[in-house]
Image: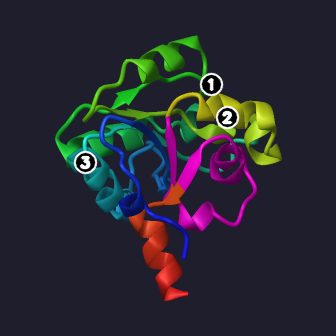
Amino acid sequence: MKKTIKDIDVRGRKVIVRCDFNVPQNESGDITDDSRIIASLPTIKYLLEEGAAIVLMSHLGRPKGEADVKFSLKPVAERLSNILERKIQFINTSDVVNAGVIEVATGLKAGDIMLLENVRFRREETENQPAFSKELAQLADIFVNDAFGSAHRAHCSTTGIAEYMTAVSGFLMEKELEFL
């Protein structure tokens, strides 16, 4: 069995988590079903309780490597902030990772949460290009894959990043693997 977040010490560390926030939305961009966000909560809450700073990442839809406001993760950041009753730092940038994102990630303290913009805004994501994987990896110390629905894809945010840092499974991934 793959190691999980219970097998490592995350206290005082920055943890980047690949979530599955590919949630359905209506014409106005309102989330119509937040069950995928809810499914990520055990991992996020555990990391908070254990004193980690958290960088979340996900995709939403198929923007084909270009920024498109209808695929922004901003509504997810707002919903997650309401559910957790805490601020989620969200930087709306089509670059996903840039100097401003790196600065915010560097300044994260235990209990802080940041959500990156849709990783599929970068064409490198679906091509699993090492340069983008390295950009993602520089944001944290540990990688947690908790996106079972995307785990079969060889993308920067699912497999590429794991080449550059310690990688473990989150609770949702662990649960799905047990079902298999």
How many angstroms separate mark 3 from mark 1 (CA)? Answer: 31 Å
Q: For numbered disc 2, what is the local secondary structure?
A: helix
Task: Residue 20 in the image: state x and y as whole percent.
Answer: 51, 56
The residue tagged with tag 1: helix, strand or loop?
loop
Point out the image quarter for the C terminus: bottom right
Q: Secondary structure at mark 3?
A: loop
Task: Name the image quarter holding residue 93.
Answer: top right
User: Which residue appears at 77% of the width and 47% of the height?
Assistant: 126
- Give left or right: position of 144 versus 79: right
- Please report whichever mark, 3 or 1, sits nearer to the chain's N-terminal start: 3
**Residue 47, percent across and down?**
31, 49
Asked if the residue under mark 1 is in contact with the one under mark 3, i.e. CB atoms within 8 Å, the reply is no
Where is residue 50? Give x, y as percent.
Answer: 25, 48
Seen at 40% across and 43% down, the residue is 76
Q: Looking at the picture, how far across and down is residue 19, in whole percent?
A: 49, 53
Front tag of 3 and 1: 3
Residue furthest bottom as drawn: 180
- The stretch in magenta equals 141-167
Q: CA distance from mark 1 to mark 2?
A: 6 Å
Disc 3: which residue: 50
For disc 1, the marked residue is 94
Magenta span contains residue 165: yes
| Residue carrying label 2 | 121
Q: CA distance from mark 2 to mark 3?
A: 31 Å
